[in-house]
């Protein structure tokens, strides 16, 4: 926005300080003058002007001294105000410089304003925190864009290779080629839909409505039960009614992703998944645990990053696109919740989603 030039804050503070000093001086001199007049008679006699004290003599004597004092207060107020305003506004200059640096694209700069806590230092600390979050967010977005580009390029490159091989083969196996192209295309579509869902959750572009996590758990379990039977995994569900507010579609996707990961990343046979819902004083909790390989805390901390998997890449029909837990994390944060991942001592992982609780509806009681 273009603005007309105006006085700087330092000049305004200087003029304000000098004005208050002058006003205080005027009031002080006025009080002295009024007090003196009470005891000085008003008998004007030029012949006895310098013999008997009167108000005219007092005025002649007092006025030059008062003018000198006011001139001194004006100069003192301007100089002192300029100096004090510069000292007070010095932190603001550092904050402004840091803002200019950040505007030019450098988010690694920090103000780190020393001294005890005051308004300027609170502002500087808040600005440093904002820069740290922005830097982390930009780095995460750049990493995500690079990973997404790589993941999308892979199926496209495979499709191109399949088509080139088919064109070079005089007698191509059309059925086999179509099956492979269908699988590659399906993976590309799944990845694109996952990216769109992730973007939608990040923007919080959804309508909030009453949702019961226990009902979503039942629906997700019924949907993924054939996949669990195929992998030899047993699903055990338990818990209470868990009412919250949010998008039913997104929270169902969250539950599906958690359950899908728990099934796919499990023991080769006789694996188990435990799904529970619970209510706390102010929150509701959805917990998904599964058996599986032992995971380190360092690896657990990276699982919610896009395109990261707990074990090596799995090339099966249900491997997913590497965005399952990233979508879970985004949906959880979009609903003002918290996501906790904890390795189980016996192997596998425990994932808890905690969301703000609401009063249950009458039909759920």
Image: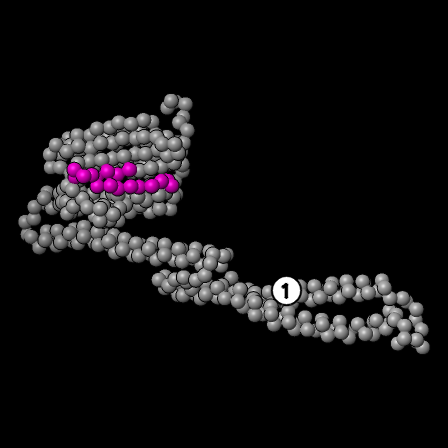
x and y, in percent, of residue 303 in the image: 23, 46
Query: Of all residues shown, which one is farthest toward the front?
Result: 51
Out of 291 and 115, give the one closest to the viewer: 115
346 magenta-colored: yes
Secondary element under disc 1, as helix, strand or loop, is helix
Q: Would you call the spot at circle 1 few (<14 residues within 10 Å), some (14-19), or many (20 or more)? A: some
Residue at image position (71%, 71%) is 70
Residue at image position (21%, 28%) is 236
User: Does residue 82 appear to the left or right of 220 in the view shown?
Assistant: right
202 magenta-colored: no
Q: Magenta residues, as a range?
A: 335-352
x and y, in percent, of residue 262 in the image: 20, 37
Mark 1 lies on residue: 16
Residue 261, above or below 149: above
x and y, in percent, of residue 59 in the image: 83, 71
User: Does residue 206 appear to the left or right of 1 in the view shown?
Assistant: left
Out of 280 and 334, give the one closest to the viewer: 280
Quadrant of the rendered structure where residue 208 is?
A: top left
Residue 294, above or below 84: above
Residue at image position (87%, 71%) is 53
**Coloration of the structure image:** one colour
Out of 163 and 266, give the one closest to the viewer: 266
Work out whether residue 268 can be spotted: yes
Work out whether residue 191 can be spotted: no
x and y, in percent, of residue 176 in the image: 9, 44
């Amino acid at each position: 926005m273009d603005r007309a030039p105006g006085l700087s804050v330092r000049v305004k503070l200087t003029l304000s300080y000098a004005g208050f000093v002058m006003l205080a001086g005027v009031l002080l001199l006025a009080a002295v003058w009024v007090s003196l007049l009470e005891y000085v008679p008003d008998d004007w006699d030029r012949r006895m002007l310098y013999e008997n004290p009167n108000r005219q003599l007092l005025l002649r004597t007092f006025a030059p001294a008062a003018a000198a004092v006011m001139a001194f207060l004006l100069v003192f107020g301007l100089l002192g105000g300029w100096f004090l305003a510069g000292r007070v506004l010095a932190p603001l200059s550092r904050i402004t410089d840091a803002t200019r640096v950040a505007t030019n694209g450098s988010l690694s700069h920090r103000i780190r304003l020393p001294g005890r806590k005051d308004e300027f230092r609170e502002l500087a600390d808040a600005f440093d925190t904002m820069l740290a979050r922005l830097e982390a967010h930009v780095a995460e977005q750049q990493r995500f864009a690079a990973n997404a580009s790589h993941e999308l390029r892979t199926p496209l490159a495979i499709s191109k290779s399949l088509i080139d091989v088919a064109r070079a083969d005089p007698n191509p196996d059309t059925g086999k080629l179509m099956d492979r192209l269908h699988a590659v295309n399906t993976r590309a579509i799944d990845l694109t839909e996952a990216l769109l869902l992730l973007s939608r959750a990040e923007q919080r572009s959804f309508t909030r409505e009453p949702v019961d996590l226990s009902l979503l758990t039942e629906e997700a379990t019924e949907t993924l039960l054939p996949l669990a039977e195929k992998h030899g995994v047993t699903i055990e569900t338990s818990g209470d009614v868990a009412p919250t507010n949010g998008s039913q579609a997104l929270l169902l996707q969250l539950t599906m992703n958690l359950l899908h990961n728990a099934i796919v990343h499990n023991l080769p046979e006789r694996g188990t998944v435990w799904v529970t819902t619970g209510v706390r004083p102010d929150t509701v909790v959805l917990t998904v645990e599964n058996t599986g390989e032992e995971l380190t805390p360092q690896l657990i901390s990276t699982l919610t990053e896009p395109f990261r998997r707990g074990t090596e890449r799995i090339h099966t029909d249900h491997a997913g696109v590497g965005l399952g837990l990233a979508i879970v994390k985004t949906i959880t944060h979009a609903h003002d919740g918290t996501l906790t991942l904890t390795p189980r001592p016996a192997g596998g992982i425990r994932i808890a989603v905690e969301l703000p609780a609401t009063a249950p509806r009458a039909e759920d009681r």
